[in-house]
Image (spheres, rainbow, N blue to C red):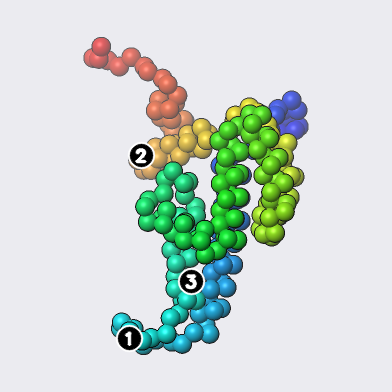
Amino acid sequence: MVAERCPNAVRCADAFHVVAWATEALDTVRAEAMATARALARTEPRRGRGRPRADAPPRPGHDRARALRHARYALWKNPENLSTDQAHKLAWIAKTDPRLHRAYLLKEGLRHVFAVKGQAGIEALDRWQSWASRCRIPAFVALGRRIRKHRPAIEAALTHDLSNALIESTNTKIRLLQRVAFGFHSADALIALAMLALGGLRPALPGRA
């Protein structure tokens, strides 16, 4: 439809959704690590209720599965937004699971591509694709192929610095207007209120300077 109605339009991939692909791939790797830990946990002795005895044998599989389950947000969040506890969890992953930590760095590398933008972003994307193709992590190898398929739209986004952020923000605000008003008698009323709240209209009101 876009090619038919707007043949000269430049199609840009949305940065948020491209980075979300990397987050999904990272979560796949985390799930694989958890499955390995749970498989080990099934071979470990069970414990009864209450606090374990001092001489109870260690259960590294159980401990690792629990730690990985609670490390989800430490892997998802941007490094600058990590809490102290999440930073410690990420450091633990870097020390104990190089494959999962490599997947995290790949996710951050793709986020960096969109942070620098322009020609620097395109060059960073070249390096990222080379890294992804030889990382030996199936989820990211597949992601590298997916990004290669959508490369023209991604390069256009890096060059023109365009995204869906403003449109999605406007849609969210319009949905909020709908909830606050508990519905409208007609679409015209919703359009009028949206234009008043979001369109920059400043009509003169009686009795106000």
Q: Is residue 107 left or right of residue 87?
A: right
On the rendered structure, is 99 left or right of 89? Answer: right
Quarter where residue 125 is shown: top right
Q: How many marks?
A: 3
Q: In x, y percent, where is residue 68?
A: 48, 65
Q: Which residue is mark 3?
A: 65
| Marks 2 and 3, how far apart at CA | 47 Å
Rendering coords of residue 182 (x, y %): 36, 43
Mark 3 or mark 1, which is nearer the start of the sequence? 1
Query: Alpha-carbon distance for marks 1 and 3?
Result: 21 Å
The three-letter code of the residue at mark 1 reads: Arg
Left or right of 29, for residue 54: left
The image shows residue 197 at horizontal and vertical percentages of: 39, 28
Crowd around label 2: few <14 · some 14–19 · many ≥20 (10 Å): few
Classed neighbour count for the residue bearing mark 1: other residues with Cα under 10 Å, few (<14), some (14–19), many (≥20): few
- The residue beneath circle 1 is 53
The residue labelled by disc 2 is 181
Q: Is residue 142 left or right of residue 29?
A: right
Choose between 76 and 17: the one closer to the eye: 76
Q: Nearer the viewer, mark 1 or mark 2?
A: 1
Q: Given contact means CB atoms under 8 Å apart, are the residues at marks 2 and 3 in contact?
A: no
Query: Residue at point 46% right, 57% down?
Result: 91
Which is more foreground, mark 1 or mark 3?
Answer: 1
Disc 3 residue type?
A: Ala
Q: In which quarter of the view is residue 66 placed? A: bottom left
**Which of the image's four quarters has the N terminus?**
top right
Above or below: residue 49 compared with residue 127:
below
Residue pushed farthest top? 209
- Reading the chain from its start, which is encountered first: label 2 or label 3? 3
- Among the two numbered marks 1 and 2 on one chain, the one whose residue lies closer to the N terminus: 1
